[in-house]
Image: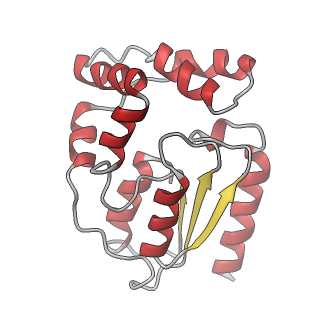
Amino acid sequence: AHSLGGLLAQRLAAQERIAGLVLLASLPPEGMFFVGPRFAATDTLIWLEALTGSLAKTGAPIRDAARRLLAGEGLPPALVERYAPRMGPESARALAEAHAPGVVPSAGIAGIPCLVLGGRLDRLILRATALRTALYHRAEFRTVAGMGHFMPLDPGADRLAADVMDWIDGVVS
């Protein structure tokens, strides 16, 4: 599960019977409680555009913020121009709920194998945050070189997907 989806997966993991959990550039167990204010301070323009896009409820792409975030993480310009117009804001309700810490059981304590992946170039979920998430879940942690927050879009995503599938095969067998 990726980013905000990773937070949802963490919140649901103990409620559902799952064989394993893979978190890619995921929000930590406390959601955006710490990540949001830090991102607002360090990447203010991107944060403001994303916030106003969410509050506007238009679903309009957040082109400028997406371009700055994607390009700032080293994505080739042709891919930035391909993906940025397709990126829309998160829902205001989802963002509000992500800022309110909730109870997230540890996957490790629940006996659920977990893999946490963090992109070395990620400006939203810093390495320390991803590592803290891995420690909380007693998970295997990997930093992925050359990737930012949007790992599934980055060059090398095919190789990353193959590595994740290998991890899943090792957990299931």
The quadrant of the image that shows the C terminus is bottom right
Residue extending farthest to the front is 41
Q: At 50% from the left edge and 69% from the top edge, which residue is drawn? A: 134
Q: Nearer the viewer, residue 70 or 91?
A: 70
Describe residue 83's horizontal placement relative to residue 101 as left or right: right
When asked about the image quadrant of residue 92, the answer is: top left
Q: How is the image coloured?
A: secondary structure
Instruction: Residue 78: give x, y in percent of width and height.
Output: 74, 17
Nearest to the observer: residue 69 or residue 109: 69
Q: Report the residue at 59% width, 54% height from top.
A: 118
Residue located at (30% from left, 14% from top): 58
Q: Position of residue 172 (x, y in %)?
A: 64, 79
Residue 154 percent coordinates (x, y) = 70, 37
Q: Is residue 118 above or below residue 13?
A: above
Of 126 and 19, the residue lying toward us: 126
Left or right, 18 with respect to 148, comes to: left
Q: Residue drawn 54% across and 75% down? A: 139
Question: Is 158 situated left or right of 18 in this image?
Answer: right
